[in-house]
Amino acid sequence: MAVFKREGTPHWQIEFTFKGEKVRQSSGTSKKREAEERERILRQELKEQLLLGKVAEMSLGQAVDRYYDGVVVPKGNIAVATRELYALNQLREGLNAATPIAKLSARALADYKDRLLAAKKAPATVNRYLATVKAILNKAKDEWGTLTVVPTIKLLPLDNARYRWLTKDEEKKLLPVCAPHLRDLVVFLMDTGARLREATTLTWVDVDLDRTPRAAVRFMETKSGKPRGVPLSTRVEEMLRQLKAKCPEGENRVFLYRPIGRGGLGGDEAKRGRAVPFNNPFSTWDTARKRAGLEDVNLHDLRHTFASRLIMRGVPLLTVSKLLGHHSIQMTMRYAHLAPDAFDAAIDLLEGGKPRAQPVAPSAALAPAEDGSGIAADVGPDGDGIDPGTLDERDDVLAQIAG
């Protein structure tokens, strides 16, 4: 019996070869005897399917296990796996793990969608769960041979046209009211366009402060699963040098904070606890934005701030797309309306080439903000991975633009 245990899961795994093809899936049980029986049944079902054209029955729980083990885990991205596992567990509970996937009809899934909405789940969350169900059922039909038809699954329409970003004046209001450890994180997010998790999980091994002409960071665990590099603005480089100097020996994470000790902070910083990774900034962020009168701004808007400032200062959409790590430039097109100068030049050509629009001055294209802050302005590597050579070439472009 080809059953074995895999580290990190309590369930026995089934693996054997049938007609030259490797069959691998979770047994869904932590008991070896039950796993061996399920392997026997699975072999029998495959034989019936081959001889009689009969489709083997599979429960949702079994499908979820197989999808997680065979699709999610091999990606090798811990952050993605954690996020996917949460969604998969929600499906187990909401659709009943014992339900045969063949009974997940369009009506059953529509009812599930209605239940999620009634529970006040956000439309984006509902779509995420439904998209996961669809991915599982497609695998069951196209690869596993356990489903003949995938039901129609209609996602909810979403309004993703959120263009909120911080102006220079709003930034000047926000930074002074941030706690020091939050201020460092906020500046980093605004000047690198990093997603929150990319920043909070950043380690010193992926910070290159000796790189020329600009220091750079490398985000290894990204939403797309593809690493990217981003050169640093002057203020972020200086801030990271200070954090590096204060970093406790043996600590790998970049962004840390010192929790207040039981005795309270008072005027003695020694009463704070030891430095720990700054994983959850939402409480202190909420306090800061209220103090600044910016309650409509969320942390992800700092990423929009990075992109919007670059576009408005004349940086091409493709460059911004690479810096943000977007899967395609279509995701960056939401910022296109912020760059009318490019269209002005096109109309100049229409009228015979006589220039009427004033191009963005090279010295102003990526000039520091009025308070002395700089904006990272370079192109990251292609989505296939980090390319230091490409980053160096683009630093030359940055030097030309910044004058």
Image: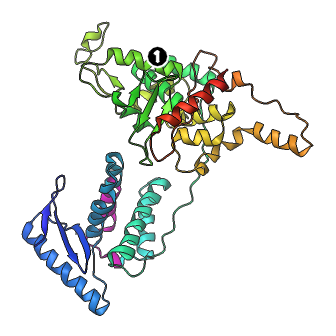
**Residue 340 showing in the rendered view:** yes
Horizontal side of 104 relative to 41 (left or right) equals: right
- Residue lying furthest bottom: 52
Q: Main secondary structure of the magenta part?
A: helix
- Position of residue 294 relative to residue 41, above or below, is above
> How many numbered discs?
1
**Quadrant (top left/top right/bottom left/bottom right) for the N terminus:** bottom left
Q: Whole-percent x and y of residue 33?
A: 7, 71
Q: Residue at x 53, y 28 (%)?
A: 191
Helix, strand or loop at label 1? It is helix
Pick the residue in front: 19 or 220. Answer: 19
Instruction: Identify the amino acid type marked 1.
Output: Glu
Q: Nearer the viewer, residue 40 or 294?
A: 40
* Residue named by callout 1: 238
- Left or right of 50: which side holds 137? right
Characterize the local packing of mark 1: few (<14), some (14-19) or many (20 or more) Cα atoms within 10 angstroms.
Answer: some
Position of 9 with respect to 189 (left or right) is left
**Rendering coords of residue 65 (x, y %):** 26, 64
Q: Which residues are magenta?
A: 86-102
Determine if the magenta segment contains residue 77: no
From the top left corner, tell me how far across and down residue 97 is, in percent.
27, 68
Compared to residue 63, the image places residue 145 above or below, namely below
In percent of the image, x 25 and y 69: which residue is there?
A: 62
- Taking the magenta stretch, the answer to whether it contains residue 88 is yes
